[in-house]
Image (tube, rainbow, N blue to C red):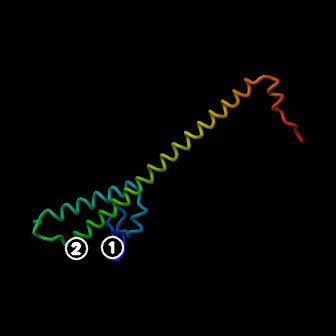
Amino acid sequence: MYKQAILLGLLFSTTKGQLTLQQVATLSVKELDETAMQLQELYDKSGQTKSFLTKRTTKDKNLKLQLDIVVDILNTKVEEQDAAALRQENKERNKKIKEIIAQKQDEALSNKSIKALEAMLTEED
């Protein structure tokens, strides 16, 4: 699908003007969503006056290709955002767990007897 768009030299109509495939990939999720909705509307309108006996034009096929690409890029970015959010949640959770472990280790150490603590002391250089 991407290869076909590159070979056709497709330009994508966006709120930022005509963009290449590479430029479309740099759009924000919101901009991609707006572009996908615009392309979907154009694609839907292009088939309204035609019958099932009439084949889709090249323009229609290009609209569908553009729509598929924009939706794919949008889905990829949303998946990346979700994965990043999950990584951040896990990082924060792990930090909290490590803090609790350190606190419990300190508590366990403070509950030891003086003899046990003295036995644990190491000589300093």
Secondary-structure class at tag 2: helix
In the image, 56: left or right of 39?
A: left
Quadrant of res 70:
bottom left
Q: Is residue 95 left or right of residue 113?
A: left
Q: Nearer the viewer, residue 6 or 110?
A: 110
Q: In the visual, does 27 lie left or right of 109? A: left
Near mark 2 (Cα within 10 A), the count class, few <14, some 14-19 or many ≥20, is few
- Tell me which corner region of the image, top left, top right, bottom left or bottom right, holds residue 30: bottom left
In this picture, is 119 found above or below 23?
above
Q: Measuring 23% from the left and 62% from the top, which residue is drawn there?
A: 42
Report the residue marked by disc 2.
58
Give the vertical position of 92 relative to 116 (above or below): below
What's the mark number on residue 122?
Answer: none
The image shows residue 68 at horizontal and vertical percentages of 30, 63
Checking the image for residue 4, the label placed there is 1
Name which residue lies at 34% across and 55% down. Answer: 33
Residue placed at 22% from the left, 63% from the top? 43
Three-letter residue code for mark 2: Thr
Q: Does dot 1 land on a helix, a strand or a loop?
A: helix
If the image is split into quadrants, where does the C terminus sit?
top right
Q: In the image, is residue 60 above or below residue 73?
A: below
In the image, what residue type sits under mark 1? Answer: Gln
